[in-house]
Amino acid sequence: MTDDPLDLVASVGDLDPVVETLRVFLHDSGALRAVAVVAGEPPAVVDVGRLAPIEVTTQQTIVHMPHAIELDAEPLTRPRVHQIPPFEVSGEDATVIGTMGGLDMIGDALLELARAFGDGAVALAEFATTNSQLPMTVSARVGEAVLVSIGEEQFEIPD
């Protein structure tokens, strides 16, 4: 851990709509964390965690924004997603048990986010499970299968 002070900003310019989109998704879905990897110029990683400062990383800088800061930006999209109970997961046999259609809903929403973030973008979100040692991460990139990671195990959501 470093003692360097945080570089705190009130805006990340052209990435403000990405921040707003992830923040809305985080609150609508109940995710622990939502992240976008944007392949723009410059490429950037926007990381929005629950009750945590927003972190935006580019090749040149890492900046932070207060989570609740008002931005002069609208979400790029707002997928139809809602909060569901935590999934039961097993890292040994890569099983996920939860609300029927819940994993598909999350995968579809993340694909919509990736599409909105532009060519080559990745959208991912981390969700709580009934096993606090095994959070579940779902990631999506347009044209590729949606991936689910549980601990060290990874599998694709079938179409």
Image (cartoon, rainbow, N blue to C red):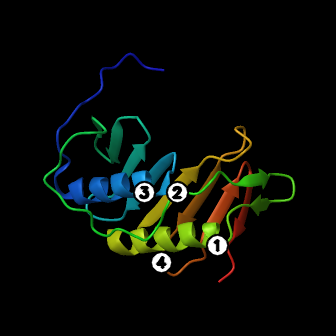
| Three-letter residue code for mark 3 | Asp
Determine which residue is flagged by label 3.
28
The answer to whether the residues at label 3 and label 1 have Cβ atoms under 8 Å apart is: no
| Three-letter residue code for mark 4 | Val
Residue drawn where x is 39% and y is 75% of the image:
115
Left or right: where 106 falls relative to 115:
right
Task: From the viewer's side, name the closer residue of 7 and 101.
Answer: 101
Disc 3 or disc 4, which is closer to the eye? 3
Instruction: Report the Cα–Cα distance between label 2 and label 3.
Output: 6 Å
Task: From the viewer's side, name the closer residue of 140 and 74.
Answer: 74
Instruction: Report the Cα–Cα distance between label 3 and label 1.
Output: 16 Å
Instruction: Report the Cα–Cα distance between label 3 and label 4.
Output: 22 Å
Tell me, for residue 142, which label it has, or none.
4
The answer to whether the residues at label 2 and label 3 have Cβ atoms under 8 Å apart is: yes
The tag earlier along the polypeptide, 3 or 1, is: 3
Task: Give percent across and percent down for residue 47.
Answer: 40, 47
Left or right: where 138 falls relative to 88:
left
Left or right: where 35 falls relative to 74:
right
Residue drawn where x is 47% and y is 66% of the image:
81
Tell me, for residue 101, which label it has, or none.
1
